[in-house]
Amino acid sequence: MKKIAVIEQIHKDGLELFEKNPEYEYELITNVSEENLIKKLPEFDGCTLRVSKLNENILKHCPNLKVISRHGVGYDNVDLPFIKKKNISLLITATANAVAVAEHVIYMMLSISKSINKYDNEVRIGNFKKNAFNIETLELFNKKMLIVGFGRIGKSLIKRCLGFEMKVNVFDPFVNEEVIKDFGGKKIENLDEGLKNCDYLSLHIPLTEETKNMIDYKKIKLMKKNAIIINTSRGGIINEIDLDKTLKNNMIFGAGLDVFEKEPLDKNNPLINNEKVLLSPHSATFTNECKSRMAIETTKNIIDFFENKLDKSMIVKI
Ligand SMILES: NC(=O)c1ccc[n+]([C@@H]2O[C@H](COP(=O)([O-])OP(=O)(O)OC[C@H]3O[C@@H](n4cnc5c(N)ncnc54)[C@H](O)[C@@H]3O)[C@@H](O)[C@H]2O)c1
């Protein structure tokens, strides 16, 4: 019998896999304070993990832990050097969430381009046609898209952009030209050139020392006045202060953010009062369908891990 800690609630469809399998017993842990995790986790053989942090201070109290199964694909909340040292495997839901994130990007691109908040408000306050004609809106058709990071989500996004008849450039030094061409995109080698030419920029890269602040004032300054920036990858890749400043100075048209340097946002984060930015609470994967897929993949990964039949794409190489 394997004991699994389900750290934070996940969709019932995933938990059912444990309930149907007598080899597994799970306990839901909703109090994710460091103190409680140190108290609870030592007895478990594996755990699922959403957004709470598993640092060395917690993990050093878990002698039985063999596997951490992330509900998602990012893993900056796990202490990688420590789990490597202790030979704890880290798994991700590699196939479950790309479509939901790609659709979220399209939702943000369309919402900002169509100034939907302004139109909606005009109707509600009784201004049906008073200002509508003068509200500036844009089309995706024929526009240049720049996708930075051509992994699972970038590849899912390009198909949707091509559906809108956009021209798609891709910046990802680690993916070769042929792969990008096969997907209908064009590889670019120089990020600055890509930024100068694009109408829409969408980021799909991990947060690393190299990508931190990748999009700052200098980079945004290169972009067109009508450009729109979307970030659904990780906060910190775009410098939020610089983004706020450039939006207020009308240097770009708008921005959509699902992820932030500090989550939840500080009340004094200037972006909260900036109407040119569309915000969502790190919720790109919160569709009913994706929550179910992610939960199933998270628990299935644990079962497959203990039964030695895990798909390699689910394992993070540390
Ligand atoms: N908003 C959300 O809820 C949500 C959900 C899922 C994933 N994410 C985030 O989205 C990002 C992408 O996820 P994915 O599943 O597509 O990851 P992935 O690992 O499949 O792809 C990442 C790609 O980024 C490329 N890359 C790495 N460094 C780069 C650099 N400096 N410049 C350009 N390209 C670079 C890699 O070559 C790779 O192709 C991750 O940061 C992940 O955490 C967010």
Image (cartoon, rainbow, N blue to C red):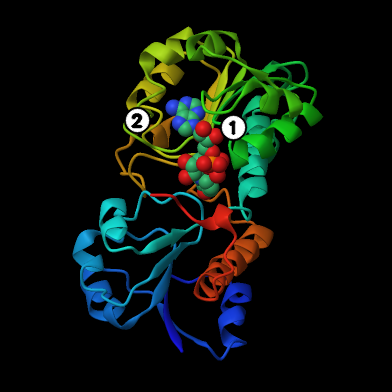
Amino acid carrying label 2: it is Lys
Residue 35, position as x, y percentages in the image: 20, 72
Amino acid carrying label 1: it is Phe
Beta carbon at label 1 within 8 Å of ligand 1: yes
Could you tell me which residue is drawn at 54 percent across and 66 percent down? 298
Residue 239, position as x, y percentages in the image: 36, 27
Q: From the viewer's perspective, is residue 226 above or below residue 285?
A: above
Give the structural element (helix, strand or loop) at label 1.
loop
Q: From the viewer's perspective, is residue 193 above or below residue 308?
A: above
Observer-nearest of 137 and 57: 57
Q: Nearer the viewer, mark 1 or mark 2?
A: 1
Residue 224, position as x, y percentages in the image: 55, 9
CA–CA distance between discs 1 and 2? 18 Å
Could you tell me which residue is drawn at 56 percent across and 78 percent down? 15
Which disc number belongs to residue 212? 2
Q: Mark 1 or mark 2: which comes first in sequence?
A: 1
Can I make out residue 187 in this image?
yes
Observer-nearest of 304 and 207: 304
| Residue named by callout 1 | 150
User: Badge 1 local density, few (<14 within 10 Å), some, or many (20+)?
Assistant: many
Could you tell me which residue is drawn at 38 percent across and 49 percent down? 318
Residue 102, position as x, y percentages in the image: 65, 41
Observer-nearest of 212 and 43: 43
1 and 2 marks in contact (CB < 8 Å): no
Beta carbon at label 2 within 8 Å of ligand 1: no
Could you tell me which residue is drawn at 40 percent across and 33 percent down? 271
Give the structural element (helix, strand or loop) at label 2.
loop
Observer-nearest of 130 and 186: 186
Q: Is residue 137 left or right of residue 83?
A: right
Q: Is residue 108 left or right of residue 165?
A: left
Can I make out residue 275 in this image?
no
